[in-house]
Amino acid sequence: MINTDVVIVGAGPCGLFQVFELGLLGLKAEIIDTIRQPGGQCTELYPDKPIYDIPAIPECTGDELTNALLKQIEPFHCGMHLGEEVEAVRRQEDDTFFVETSAGKQFNAKAIVIAAGVGSFQPRPIRVPNAEDFTDKTLHYRVRDPKQFFGKKLVILGGGDSALDWVLELAGKAERITLVHRRDEYRAMPDSVSKMKQLVADGVIDEFTSAKASAINGEDGHVTSIVIQPKEGEATEVEADHVLVFFGLAPKLGPIAEWGLDINRKTINVDTEKFETSEPGIYAVGDINYYPGKKKLILCGFHEAALAAFAIKQRIEPEKKVHVQYTTTSPIMHERLGIEGEAE
């Protein structure tokens, strides 16, 4: 049994920053995540994609943000339990929580924070009979190493930001790119659509709209060509070395949906004072929560994590008033951060 102040479900940016905010208040945390590495969607979906809206950081990649957050929480020695799913949560007689994972690990916690992003998510798969024969070999739902596509013939399927971001990133580096979208209009940022259309006009990439991939040809896990079927007209066979599929994510709350929380579609309702759910002692921060005016931005999740930390501190130590102390001047903060010397 692992005894801790808080169990955090989710190792994405908000979950990692939650460790920091709790640590500043002297609270110990343990993180559990189904993904086998920290970083959440940043690591899984866009490790190399630039992020521009983190305060005071003009530009960083998903991996860089994750590594910076991991560095920031080092003083607090947070336990990381990755590749595990929370399977059981039970309130105990003393109002603490019993938590058990799919690996059989058991925790006793005074509070729980759900920072699970969109939940347990999976990319929406391409519906072609033999797709699994090529998956994670030459058919990809995420980009882990862009260099493997340099000098290759690519077919990119999708019409959202991820699809167009990788079209723009790999244009001129791949031998040829064919973009296939099932609709006439794109869901991506207008600037990205404009840049992509210019590449089409310049003959750098090929574009098929109102069309879909109807067959994948190849053997031994290696794609050789894709058959593209428009809504009207004859099918076209396009040579390909790799296929990149970006049909979005299918979010699933998984076992969280069984915890008795007030669920709003596939999000969890919280208040905006404590970011507490309908179950006292269970909080939710980041993309998984909902309240009026909610914006799914990393910086909003950071704000939620800070307020949740103060609420949890007050719950755990109700007899004490929780004071705001500043990391620039507080000797207590410096001690918790492992900074030598006292504040002046």
Image (cartoon, grey):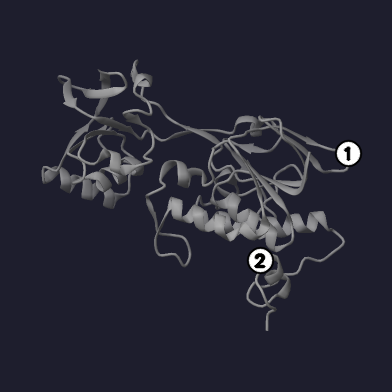
Does residue 306 appear to the left or right of 69 in the view shown?
Answer: right
User: How many circles with numbers are drawn on the protein?
Assistant: 2
Q: Residue at x 59, y 33 (%)?
A: 253
| Residue 128, horizontal then vertical, whole percent | 33, 19
Q: Which quadrant: the C terminus? A: bottom right
Is 5 or 265 nearer to us in this picture?
5
**What is the number of the mark on residue 93?**
1
Q: Residue at x 72, y 62 (%)?
A: 25
Q: Which quadrant: the N terminus? A: top right
| Residue 332, horizontal then vertical, whole percent | 73, 71
Residue 201, can we see it?
yes
Query: Looking at the rendering, which quadrant does residue 161 occupy?
Result: top left
Q: Residues within 10 Å of mark 2 (few under 14, many from 20)?
A: some
Q: CA distance from mark 1 to mark 2?
A: 34 Å
**What is the number of the mark on residue 337?**
2
**What is the number of the mark on residue 151?**
none
Is 323 or 340 nearer to us in this picture?
340
Residue type, label 2:
Leu
Circle 1 sits in a helix, a strand or a loop, which is it? loop
Does residue 56 appear to the left or right of 189 in the view shown?
Answer: right
Residue type, label 1:
Glu
